[in-house]
Amino acid sequence: MKPALPFREAVLAFVRRIPKGRLASYGQIALMAGFPRRPRQVGMILKGLPENTELPWHRVVNTHGYVPSKGRWWGAQVQIARLRKEGIEVDELGNLDLERYRWEGVPLKLSRKAESIFTSGER
DNA sequence: ATGATGACATCTT
DNA sequence: AAAGATGCCATCA
């Protein structure tokens, strides 16, 4: 069996912190977890979550403001339903108003230039 | 080890 | 604004 990596733990911890009725992007989560270049891995972690998880994974969308793959993904409909349950308006394609519901207090996204600052540890 | 894949993001047309 | 191409990197075959 593989040991639980800190990356995974950090991601899960942040996802759990997303306030109800708010949204965060994959890139945002990866960034806050300390890995600005790994939004896709965030998705992989969420994919591996158990069905009965307490984590609000449905509050994680992409920066374009819609549910991943516009509903082509097998669980997109589930995610959309759960978002609506929290009072977030979402259409059948998974489109939503990210600016309206985004998680307050954290940057929405990061430019490449700003990323280099993060990775190099300089300022 | 190499190549393909993916619940993404950013850049260029 | 919308669509295609490129970049990233862990997981899988």
Image (cartoon, coloured by chain):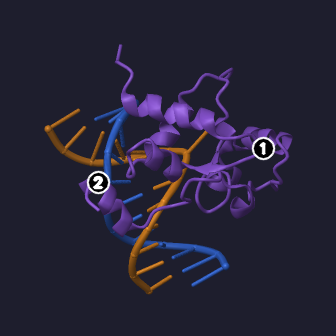
Chain colours: A purple, B orange, C blue
- Which labelled disc corresponds to residue A83? 1
- Which labelled disc corresponds to residue A26? none
The disc labelled 2 sits on which kind of residue? Thr
For label 2, the residue is A119
Q: Position of residue A88 (x, y in %)?
A: 81, 50
Q: Is residue A74 left or right of residue A78?
A: left
Foreground residue among A10 and A69: A10
In the rendered view of the protein, which quadrant contains the C terminus of chain A? bottom left
Label pair 2/1, CB-CB below 8 angstroms: no
Foreground residue among A54 and A66: A54
Q: Is residue B12 left or right of residue B1?
A: right
Q: Is residue A47 left or right of residue A121?
A: right
Mark 2 or mark 1, earlier in chain:
1
Residue shown at the point (68%, 57%) measured from the top left: A66
Residue shown at the point (70%, 50%) measured from the top left: A71
Q: Measure the C-alpha gap from mark 2 to mark 1.
A: 33 Å
Residue shown at the point (58%, 37%) measured from the top left: A15
State which chain disc 1 sits on.
A
Q: Position of residue A82 (x, y in %)?
A: 78, 38
Foreground residue among A63 and A10: A10
A78 w.r.t. A121: above or below: above
Using the rendered view, name the quadrant where residue A76 is placed: top right
In the rendered view of the protein, which quadrant contains the N terminus of chain A? top left
Determine whether the residue tagged by mark 2 lies in a helix, strand or loop.
helix
Q: Position of residue A51 (x, y in %)?
A: 66, 23
The disc labelled 1 sits on which kind of residue? Leu
